[in-house]
Image (cartoon, rainbow, N blue to C red):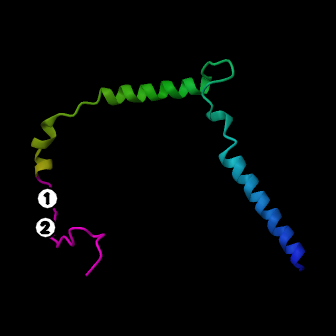
Amino acid sequence: MSNLLKNLLIALGLAILLFGGYMLFFRGDESLTTINDAGTFSQDAELKTQQLLATLNELKSFNVEGRIFSDPIFASFRDFRIDLGTEPSGRPNPFTPIQ
C-alpha cells in the first residue's frame, strides 16, 4: 500500500473518531433536557422528580433507634481488628533535598 493511501486511511479514521467523539460528548441527549422550549418542565422530568421526592419521603420516615446495640445478637459480634502498631513517619519535609 502506498504512503498516500495509508495517510488517507489514517486521516479518514481520525475524522470518524473525532466526529463520533463530538456526537457523544458535545451534542447532548434531548431526553436529558428537563425544560422544553416553552420554559416548562417536561413530563419525564416531572415523573423523575416525583419519584425522587417519594424516595426522599421514605428516607425521612426512617428512624434509627438505639435498641439494636442492646440486642444479644449484636453483642455476640466479634471484633476482628488487628493492631498494626506505629510506623516510622519519615522526613519532616519530604520535598527538601537529601544531603
The answer to whether 28 appears left or right of 69 in the picture is right
Q: For mark 1, what is the residue?
A: 78
**Residue drawn 63% across the image and 19% down it:** 39
Circle 2 residue = 83
Quadrant of image for the C terminus: bottom left
Rendered-image quadrant of the N terminus: bottom right
* 1 or 2: mark nearer the eye: 2
Q: Which residues are magenta?
A: 76-99
Residue 77 horizontal side relative to residue 59, left or right: left
Q: Residue at x 48, y 28 (%)?
A: 51
Local SS, label 2: loop
Residue 31 lies left or right of residue 65; in this view the side is right
Tell me, yes or no, whether the highlighted magenta stretch contains residue 67: no
Depicted 32 relative to depicted 75: above or below: above
Q: Residue at x 87, y 78 (%)?
A: 3
Query: Which circle's residue, 1 or 2, is located before the other in the chain?
Result: 1
Q: Residues within 10 Å of mark 2 (few under 14, many from 20)?
A: few
**Label 1 neighbour load within 10 Å: few <14, some 14-19, many 20+:** few
Q: Position of residue 90 (x, y in %)?
A: 21, 72
